[in-house]
Image (cartoon, grey):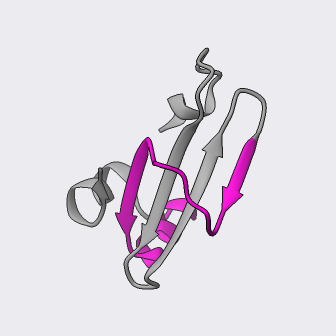
Amino acid sequence: MSVLYKPHGQDTEIVVEFYFTDLEKTYQLVLEKTKCMFKEKDFLPFTLRIETSFEVWAAISDGKLSGVRARFFNINIV
């Protein structure tokens, strides 16, 4: 996913959508050339959607679980 954070040379946004299955909540990060916006509503069509529990995502963020390992067991990427 780190490639999404590099300038992508396109005029279109990259929209990363997170759906936390245990919270039944959806959030988006809208990545533009020079800024990133966080959305809780009024969603855009996504470029990438990640479906996982918040518990798994928090473990990845804290370095307690490998993202690669979680990908095969707990995360759906659309």
- In this rendering, the answer to whether 24 lies above or below 56 is below
Q: Residue furthest top?
A: 9
Classify residue 54 as left or right of residue 8.
left
Residue 56 magenta-highlighted:
yes
How many labels, in total?
A: 0
Residue 6 lies left or right of residue 52; in this view the side is right
Identify the residue at horizontal 39%, vertical 53% (top origin).
49
Q: Residue furthest left?
A: 72
Query: In the figure, 51 relative to 34: above or below?
Result: below
Q: Is residue 13 above or below residue 17?
A: above
User: Residue 8 lies in what quarter of the image?
Assistant: top right
| Left or right, 6 with reference to 76 | right
Is 55 contained in the magenta span?
yes
Residue under the point 57% across and 57% down: 28
**Looking at the image, which residue sits at the far front?**
42
Looking at the rendering, the stretch of residues picked out in magenta corresponds to 36-64
Q: Nearer the viewer, residue 77 or 45?
A: 45
Left or right of 13 in this view: 59:
left
Determine the residue located farthest toward the bottom in the rendered image.
Answer: 23
Q: Percent from the top left, x then y, of residue 39?
A: 66, 61
Tell me which residue sits at (63%, 46%) in the image: 30
Q: Position of residue 7 (x, y in %)?
A: 65, 21
Residue 41 locus on image (x, y percent): 62, 68
Q: Which of these two is toward me, 47 or 61?
A: 47
Give the answer, above or below, for where 7 lies relative to 65: above
Residue 43 pos. (x, y %): 56, 59
* Residue 13 or residue 60, whichever sits in front: 13
